[in-house]
Structure formats: C-alpha cells, structure tokens
Amino acid sequence: MTQSTNKSGGPMSRGYLVAGNWKMNGSSASNAALVEGLLRGIAECPAIDVLVCPPALYLDAVRRHIGAAPIAVGGQNLSDEREPGAYTGELHASMLNDVGCSHVLVGHSERRTLYGENDACVARKFVVAQAGGLIPVLCIGETLAEREADQTEIVLKRQLDAVIAAAGIGAFINAVVAYEPVWAIGTGRTASVEQAQAAHAFIRGVLAANDAKIANSVRLLYGGSVKADNAASLFSCEDVDGGLIGGASLKAPEFLAICASAQILAASLDA
Ligand code: 13P
C-alpha cells in the first residue's frame, strides 16, 4: 500500500493521533492509576499525539495529574447551546476549555443512538466546540443494518454533509474525523483493513469534493475494537491517521501498546 505523503512529515503532515475514549468508566482512584501508567510510558511515543477523554467530572483532575506530559485531554460531549445559562446538567464548550481540554468528541454513535442526537444537533455541537476554542473529533459511522443494505457511503456522506453545511469546509482545518462503524464498537469485531481504508478514502473524498487541500490535512481516526494486536495493520492504511480507542484505552499497557504501533509507523515515515 502506498503511503500518503501527508503522513510522512513536511509542512502538511497529518501525523498520528491516538485517542482514548474512557466512556462512563472509572473513579478517582482508577483514573489516577491509569494516568500513572500512561505517564510511565508516554515518553516512548514522541512522534505521535495522544489524547484521553475521561468522564467530564474527572477532566480537571486528570488534566492536573498529567501536568506537562504530552497527553492532551478532551471531553466526551458538550452542550449545543451557544451561550452558557440555564441549562441544568449541561456543559458549555468554554468550561471544557477552562479546565484545559483541547478536544471534544462530537456525535459519538452512543450519543446518536442512546441520547437521540441527530445530524443537526451534532453539527451544532461541532460549531459551538470550535467557537469555544476546542478541536471537535467528529464521530461518524454506519450501523450493521446500514452496511448490509449497502448504505455505508450514503450514511457517511449524510453525516459529514450536515457538518460541512453548518460549519463550512474551512472549519475542518481545526477538526478531526473519527470513522467508527457502529457494528465494530465494543463488539470485538473490527473492520478489516480493506473496509477501514475504503471508508476512510471515501470520507476524505467527500471532504476533497469541497476542498482538496483541507481534505488532505484532516486526520481521520479509525474506532471500533482497536486493540494492541490489530492497531498496526489498521494504522498502516493510507488514510488512517490513528485511532479512537474505547475499551482498550482503560488499561495503560494496552493503550500504550496501541500508541507504540503508531509511534513505530510515524518513526519509519520520518526516517
Ligand atoms: P471500543 O474500542 O471499545 O470498540 O470502542 C470504540 C469507541 O466507541 C471509541 O469511541
């Protein structure tokens, strides 16, 4: 497989990003142990970017614990309201920014399916995330039924187009897109390398139809049952620029092993 020149360094280099989505897991004590584990190994991965997304309640403590180590912190969700105010239980983008978040997940399939977030809501969240100084990690992906009905590309394009219409293609200069086939999330069933690359190439093509240069610069992460033993093959796909890791991000050795897969690829491209 030919490597994209954009993975290989230079001014337009995308580089790798490995992100952990802790979902609704952890406690003060277990988070501290997890961060300790990550801090012990992160120096081995200087050529990649690493992000962790703990539950909102713990963002501040995790950010402080990480200190100056090269691990970014992001939220898992945010309000779609433009201004803070009387919205009980919600978190404004500026609050995530205030406690040191650089990123926020937007439109994760669990938010879409369990909490009724539609494309318009996800697009509003993408816009307010950026307005609040955060880099949105836009999650898109098809269900098993949609894949089996040959709807994958239609769904991906619909989910992307909703955000492009609301935010403009220029907004993707400061965004990450995560392709997470719903049927691969938490199931142990990973997309094949061919399925992942095909979906990522399609996503980049949709972006390129709006602006080829921006499309080439956007990091596209793969998510769905990424583990230490399949990360290297997925990450070596031309249009896969890292991963969004759920279950395997809760154990420091496993997450660091996934980071190491990206590090090895990044270092070989730099060489
Ligand atoms: P798993 O890695 O547990 O399949 O979860 C993927 C995911 O949803 C990350 O956002």
Image (cartoon, rainbow, N blue to C red):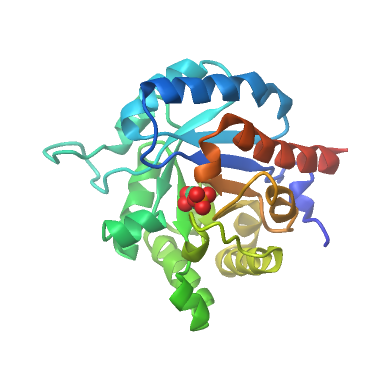
Q: Nearer the viewer, residue 159 or 62?
A: 62
**Whole-percent x and y of residue 219?**
61, 50
Quadrant in which residue 145 is drawn:
bottom left
Determine the residue located farthest toward the left in the rendered image: 86
Left/right placement of residue 195 relative to residue 264 reads: left
**Whole-percent x and y of residue 10?**
77, 42
Q: How many marks?
A: 0
* Quadrant (top left, top right, bottom left, bottom right) of the C terminus: top right
Q: Residue at x 37, y 55 (%)?
A: 110
Determine the residue located farthest toward the right in the rendered image: 271
**Whole-percent x and y of residue 115?**
26, 56
Left/right placement of residue 159 relative to residue 81 reads: right
Q: Residue at x 11, y 38 (%)?
A: 86
**Whole-percent x and y of residue 120?**
31, 63
Left/right placement of residue 211 relative to residue 263 reads: left
Determine the residue located farthest toward the bottom in the rendered image: 149
Can residue 9 be seen here? The reply is: no
Left/right placement of residue 211 relative to residue 139 reads: right
Can residue 52 be seen here? The reply is: yes
Above or below for 232 versus 94: below
Q: Residue at x 65, y 25 (%)?
A: 42
Q: Residue at x 43, y 66 (%)?
A: 159
Above or below for 236 versus 103: below
Determine the residue located farthest toward the front in the rendered image: 188
* Quadrant (top left, top right, bottom left, bottom right) of the N terminus: bottom right
